[in-house]
Image: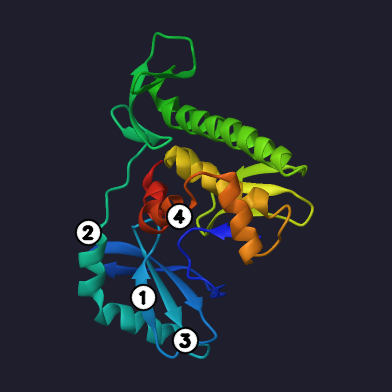
Amino acid sequence: MALRSTAPRNIHLQALQPGSLEVAEREVPVELQRHPRARRISLRISKTGDGIVMVLPKRAAIREAMDFAERNSGWILKHLEDQPARIAFAPGAIIPLFGVDHVVEHDAAAKRGVWRGEGRILVSGQVEHLPRRLGDFLKREARREISARAREKAARIDRRIGRISLRDTRSRWGSCSSRGDMNFSWRLVLTPDYVLDYVVAHEVAHLVELNHSQRFWRLTDSLTPEMERAKAWLSREGGRVHRYG
């Protein structure tokens, strides 16, 4: 079972080929999706905030969709400009490690790799390697924290976890297979501690209930202290973590 990020519940979409649309001399990525129950073309800003997603009825022509986007170019441009700016991994960037803002600093003379200070993440080595080194550091931190919490929670319900994998998924925060293998988004390291804890609890609860029944939600609630608060944060703020890096 999967814990999805901001995709609508009970909706299954088939992705079509991506394209682009020029809006006010700006090339905007376009993702086309078909929905079996859609009656008209609709559009929304993508989770990354730099493109649009268009949902088409089953038999709508792609050209018709692009015409629809062009007619709504004013709406697209306004909402793209309202999106938070992308934040590159670079000196001076502010990264919310476990939901707490940390300033990225470059120390070329140091030989410590990447380490965490008081309100800082320090990166040594050549500056051109900083994005990769910082990304690797964040993924290691995510793996360490997620793995420890998942195994501790699984032991509480007398279950064993299979393989734990980290990916950069955009449609789900975590998933659990019937074999007990789990996948998580490494970007959980950028969410508040109670949010990461909830996502881990959610997937661990699937070791017992591979569904979303009332029993499942009661079990999840017993494994994490702030389930409802975390769910509200993910619904409201979850898409923002995809702007980093």
Mark linked to residue 228: 4
Answer with left or right where residue 141 lies relative to residue 48.
right
> Which of marks 2 and 1 precedes in the sequence?
1
The circle on residue 43 is 1
Q: Secondary structure at mark 2?
A: helix
Q: Secondary structure at mark 1?
A: strand
How far is disc 1 from disc 2 in space, using C-alphas? 16 Å
Q: Pick whichever of labels 4 and 3 is earlier in the sequence.
A: 3
Pointer 3 or 2: first along the chain: 3
Looking at the rendered structure, the kind of residue marked 1 is Leu
How far is the residue under mark 4 from the one under mark 2? 28 Å
Given residues 116 and 24, the one toward you in this image is: 116
Q: Mark 4 or 1, which is nearer the eye?
A: 4
Whole-number angstrom distance, CA of label 1 to CA of label 3:
12 Å
Mark 4–mark 1 distance (CA, rounded to whole Å):
29 Å
Q: Quadrant of residue 71?
A: bottom left
Q: Position of residue 50 (x, y in %)?
A: 34, 58
Q: Residue at x 73, y 52 (%)?
A: 207
The residue sitting at 40% across, 56% down in the picture is 232
Q: Which residue is mark 2?
A: 82
Residue 149 is left or right of residue 16, and the answer is right
Q: Quadrant of the N terminus?
A: bottom right
Q: Is residue 212 shown to the viewer in this render?
A: no
SS for dot 4:
helix
Q: Are marks 4 and 3 in contact (CB under 8 Å)?
A: no
> Could you tell me which quadrant the C terminus lies in?
top left
Name the disc covering residue 38, or none: 3
Question: Which kind of residue does numbered mark 3 sit on?
Answer: Ala
Position of residue 14 measured from the top left corner of the image (x, y, whole percent): 57, 75
First in residue order: circle 1 vs circle 3:
3
Label 3's element? Answer: loop
Residue 215 visible: yes
